[in-house]
Image: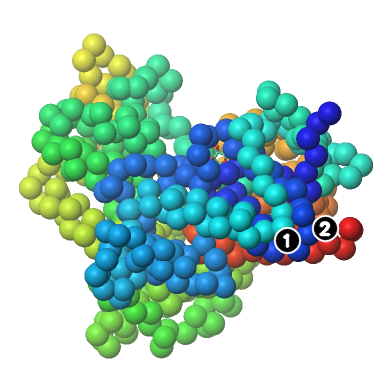
Amino acid sequence: MHPRFDIAIVGGAAAGTLAAIQHLRQAATPLRIAVFEPAPRLAEGIAYSTQRPEHLLNVPTGRMSALPDRPSDFLDWFAARPEHAGASREALAHGYAPRRDYARYLADRLHDARQASPASLEVLPWRIEALAREADGWRLSSAQGTALAERVVLAVGNAQRPLPVRGSGALARPRLVDAWDYAGVAAIDPAAEVCIVGTGLSMVDVLLTLDANGHRGRIHLLSRHAMLPRAHSTNPAADEAFDVDALHPLGVRERLRRLRQGMRDAAARGLPWQAVMERLRPHGQALWRSLDAAEQRRFLRHAVRYWDIHRHRIAPEVGAILADWYADGRLVLHRARLDMAVAGQRCVQLTARTRDGRSLVLDVDHVVNATGLELRVQAMRNPLLEQLLGEGHARPGPHGIGLDIDAEGRLLDADGRPHEDLRVIGSLRIGEAWETIAVPELRVQAQAIARAFTTAQAAAA
Ligand SMILES: Cc1cc2nc3c(=O)[nH]c(=O)nc-3n(C[C@H](O)[C@H](O)[C@H](O)COP(=O)(O)OP(=O)(O)OC[C@H]3O[C@@H](n4cnc5c(N)ncnc54)[C@H](O)[C@@H]3O)c2cc1C
């Protein structure tokens, strides 16, 4: 007999855990819920599995609640911890908590929701490899077994981009280390010469660990555009005078012009440029959806890098560490396209081409892949996604990024028909929603999917 559930959640990191919490909280009947997650602990995933204290959230504590109806819930949890006794609540709200604490918080809230719910939750350590249609739902198959579920939430999260270069297939740990391999990065000798490929937030994580380990060797940062993430301001205000609605009818070029002007106007009123980005923050999805397909392509081709470094910022104290490293010459920034990586006896030789056509050769002890998230669904190397695409249950999202879904998160099949009983949470919604990766979006998606699924279950009972 195969186990049978009302709701199956595939993936049990942050998004899957938020979905489980919401189903448990909203259930009015003894629903049977299952989370399928091969990792040893729920709620961690890529972002929150780090045990390194220097890896901080990139969203202030006051905005990281798991629950849309209790906006200060994470702050309450964090402030109640013994190590914060006597700390100013205001300072904690605007600060950046260690990411490892966030997994503990989610696990606590899952525990609370389980205790208070009439529903039951089972966690199975299975990696689901295929979903097949059944008369009343879906059959979920994995090497460990098969289960049946009436409704499925797909929460399979992020995939890392492979190092985009000839020769990298022949490199292995410890010469080639992934930025999300936190233990691998921590094991790098402090005297080693290191090249980090990619200059986004994953690169910052790597640098912080090297810094915490007293790294002395030279660090090369290499990326095609060599643009570093900007820091948050210590003034968290949003510029309420900036007219967001006026952006909607405009194309990308004109929007950028308005943004730059808005930042100058903000400065004239004593506000940091970040205040304009803060004003845009709740409107990210609407701004993306109001671009037509050609303008979205233009954004992806020409503006996305500028958007990313201004939108996904680092804590001010982290920005200060980066500036120090840069100033004392330990950090060298290269604007170049990596061509080849060749493993030697002792080192890795990297060959790259700079913007002005020069050849750049670096001999380093380690190369770290910090190229970030793979957005193209066909390159994610997740067998479940390949099966869903191959059998026509799904199709790639707009511009080939993520999966094609509707605004309620229903997965669309190869003919564009929505699956009422198969919904997607998180980064796979990127083509439709753009802003869909961070907790402020995940918690709202989890709540909405749980509302739809628990209502449908109650109606069918
Ligand atoms: C380094 C990093 C730092 C971040 N920091 C922040 C932050 O400070 N604040 C913020 O709001 N957001 C942050 N984010 C955004 C982050 O993506 C989300 O907050 C969140 O962690 C995403 O969780 P997820 O569950 O969607 O994905 P993931 O963490 O990628 O987890 C997906 C899970 O699905 C499981 N899975 C995959 N395929 C299957 C399958 N076939 N069967 C069963 N299970 C499967 C995997 O084992 C994994 O546990 C960060 C992201 C990264 C990469």
Q: Quadrant of residue 125?
A: top right
Q: Is tag 2's residue or tag 1's residue first in the polypeptide sequence?
A: 1
Residue 457 marker: 2
Whether tag 2 and tag 1 are in contact, CB under 8 A, the answer is yes
**In the rendered image, which quarter contains the N terminus?**
top right
Q: Is residue 14 depicted above or below 85 in this figure?
A: above
* Residue 183 placement (x, y as % from top left): 32, 32
**In the rendered image, which quarter contains the C terminus?**
bottom right
* Residue 280 placement (x, y as % from top left): 46, 74
| Residue type at numbered disc 2 | Gln
Give the labeled residue for mark 1. 27
| Mark 1 burial class by Cα count in 10 Å: few <14, some 14-19, many 20+ | many
Report whether 260 appears left or right of 455. left
Q: CA distance from mark 2 to mark 1?
A: 9 Å
| Mark 2 burial class by Cα count in 10 Å: few <14, some 14-19, many 20+ | some
Which is in the foreground here, disc 2 or disc 1? 1
